[in-house]
Amino acid sequence: MSSPQKLNAVFYRSANGHEPVRDWLKGLPKPERQAIGEDIAYVQFKWPIGKPRVDHLRGSVWEVRTSLGNRIARTLFAVVRGQMVLLHAFIKKTQQTPSEAIDLAEKRFKEWRHGET
């Protein structure tokens, strides 16, 4: 039996070259960046996995949940052909993931798929 392939994490990049998830991560304190990075790496190596670390939101959009002490970070992503496309990330302020965040991730995924070669 072969071991599962590691997902290759890639950042969504807008038409103007902006990488919103990378930029968001750069604005966080180093320990929080590390915790989020470790959770993303865990998903890369263990995919497919489910709760509590990962949850399916809608369509192609999934989320990685990272606990940051008294806050919770969400990194929204999609998986296509061995790639984990990091679409959107934020600190969660409500119980549910806001539908606007999922809508934005879906929009970015469509743009990413349209632009990929």
Image (cartoon, grey):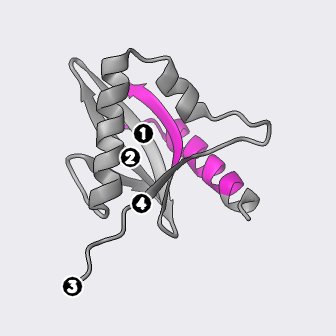
Q: Is residue 93 visible?
A: no
First in sequence: mark 2 or mark 1?
2
Amino acid type at circle 4 is Leu
Kind of element beneath mark 4: loop
Q: Residues within 10 Å of mark 2 (few under 14, many from 20)?
A: many
Q: CA distance from mark 3 to mark 4?
A: 18 Å
Identify which residue is drawn at 63% across, 35% down.
Answer: 19
Q: Is residue 75 magenta?
A: no
Q: CA distance from mark 4 to mark 1?
A: 15 Å
Per the image, the residue denoted by label 4 is: 7
| Whether residue 28 is situated above or below residue 97 in the rendered picture | above
Per the image, the residue denoted by label 2 is: 63
Q: Nearer the viewer, mark 3 or mark 2?
A: 3
Amino acid type at circle 3 is Met
Kind of element beneath mark 2: strand
Q: CA distance from mark 2 to mark 1?
A: 5 Å
Amino acid type at circle 1 is Thr
Farthest residue to the right: give it: 16
